[in-house]
Amino acid sequence: MKSKLIYLLVMLVGVLACSEDFTESTAFGALSDDALKNAEGVELLLVGAYSLLDGHSATGGADWSKTADGWWYDAISDDAHKGSTNGDQADLFLLETFDWNTANPYFGEKWRALYASVNRCNAVLSLIRQLEEDGDPGDYSQQKAQALFLRAHYNFELQKAWGNPAFISVDNFDASEFNQENTGPIWEEIEGDMLEAVNTLGPTSEVGRPNTFTAHAYLGKILLYQGKWNEALTYLEPVLLQGPYNLLPEFVDNFRLAGETGAESVFAIQFTADTGDSFDGNRGGTLSFPNGGPISSCCGFYQASQDLMNAYKTENGLPLLDTYNQTDVKNDQGLASADPFEPYTGELDPRVDFTIGRRGLDMNGFGVNIGKDWIRATSNDLGGPYLTKKNYYHAGEDANRGTGGWGEQRSGINYHIIRYADVLLMAAEAYVETGELGLALDLVNQVRNRAKNMTYLKSVDNPNQDAANYSIEPYGSFPDAEFARKAVRFERRLELGVEGHRLFDLRRWGVATEVMNAYIANESRTLTGMASVNAYTATYDIFPIPLGAIDLSGGILNQNPGY
């Protein structure tokens, strides 16, 4: 399923799958068409539900606001900046600077895209119900379980972002009942859908589709987000002990052709690059490439923060958990590409240079990053001197190289919704909270030892020499729960940096206000404009319900507190 969809098929599914916009009256009749009431029709609608994993449907809006790869979520965390110039994508600039309003299109378009996705899942479930009621002898249990898995995923995305979304089920999937109140979290409904997927899906699956171990991992994540530690372990442990997954020997292969459907991929969006404006590529990430640079790309968005760069500093191979941000890794902010610059020589975790693009080092096989000339933002903008690398394909991997009409790059790099390193660290987190520090230590050290033993980035001038002073070692012990908790949380950032998880980790840990305000203050050492960023408050721990959705619902939807 590497090739997600054929565009014509998706357009057909868009017609068949009823309304895709929550708070908009739905069209009826198409699903009862005899031509669809068969196994082929079920599979057709199911492919349509999968096709929205990337966030793109007929709901309108910009590609990048609906994207499922999490890049603009990172831009309102301490992992990254929006990048580019402050005035380009001004709505996202308002989000990064915590000047939020309920009409911001980034909120509205992401909301609509996710409800469009829920509706496609309900279309599958509705058709299966009709077939069963009509006495069809077919076995649709696997298709139903996949639709429930996907509905749980889309509703989880709504829940973690908005806190109080409405649950739209197949039972209220009609014009008179479509607008449902948002009376509180929908965790119970999400858990129920994913549990049925756990119990029904088989141990193997086609590439891109879930199996029972995928569902186990996802249900563990759902429970982890609620602080249900023992219950989370009930579903995470079978993945560790019996699942088909493992860490890839090379960290970077998670973002290259060599490993994108390999042993570490638990559940991923299957992107494919092809000629022209590919509908199978990552349309939402088209802005997130160097402005110019070695491939004449666009548009300079998604720049890693100085804070994230500093997090990769080590001492005797271990992270500086409490002091990493007291001083900065040397950067070239404000320097022209022609100005002399020597990269930082202190100890660094080797994952840094497969995560962040910085001056003086190789940029995914395209040669030395020359700094300012590859950075669109000026010194007055909230961009900074760094790029991101996990979303940037490698030289020679043309199967992942996107193309477009104005420098855009709809790349074919898969986006990992869950990878095995994430599962290890989620289980480690749960073990810390249940007092099993030794088990947590082992899992964290599995992740760190992979990084220690992988191939390090090499100097462009000397392929036998490391590109920087890399030093990483496993932890010797976790002396107490406080230290272990800090170490596990820090490891998540180092391993999963700029993969779209950081904002929601900070929120669910209850530390977002403290961490983000410290970040705003410290980041101003590199970007003076950060001094004018508004303070983060607890209000920002969930997004506002989009004003347009409330209006279209006739006031049925209730706004989140503080907005």
Image: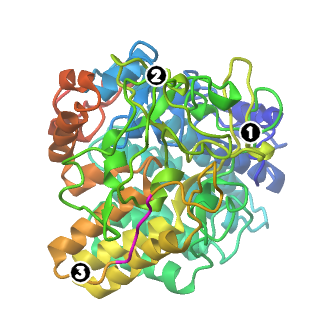
Q: Residue at x 63, y 48 (%)?
A: 460
Q: Which residue is mark 1?
A: 401
The first of marks 3 and 2 along the sequence is 2
The first of marks 1 and 2 along the sequence is 2
> Tag 2, which secondary structure?
loop
Expressed as whole percent of the image width and height from the top left, the position of residue 53 reads 60, 45
From the viewer's perspective, tell me whether residue 131 is left or right of residue 57: right
Q: Residue at x 33, y 80 (%)?
A: 440
Highlighted range, magenta: 469-474
Expressed as whole percent of the image width and height from the top left, the position of residue 474 reads 37, 77
Q: Residues within 10 Å of mark 2 (few under 14, many from 20)?
A: few
> Tag 3, which secondary structure?
loop
Task: Tell me, yes or no, whether the highlighted magenta stretch contains residue 433.
Answer: no
Expressed as whole percent of the image width and height from the top left, the position of residue 374 reads 55, 27
* Residue 554 can be seen in this image: no
From the viewer's perspective, tell me whether residue 110 is left or right of residue 294: left
**What's the CA distance linking mark 3 and mark 2?**
45 Å
Observer-nearest of 202 and 298: 298
The first of marks 3 and 1 along the sequence is 1
From the viewer's perspective, tell me whether residue 408 is left or right of residue 65: right
Decide whether the magenta segment is chiefly helix, strand or loop: loop
**What's the CA distance linking mark 3 and mark 1?**
43 Å
* Residue 197 can be seen in this image: yes
Q: Which residue is mark 2?
A: 336
Expressed as whole percent of the image width and height from the top left, the position of residue 66 reads 52, 32
**Tag 2: amino acid:** Ala
**Tag 1: amino acid:** Arg
Q: Which residue is mark 3?
A: 478
Query: Which quadrant is the N terminus positioned in?
Result: bottom right
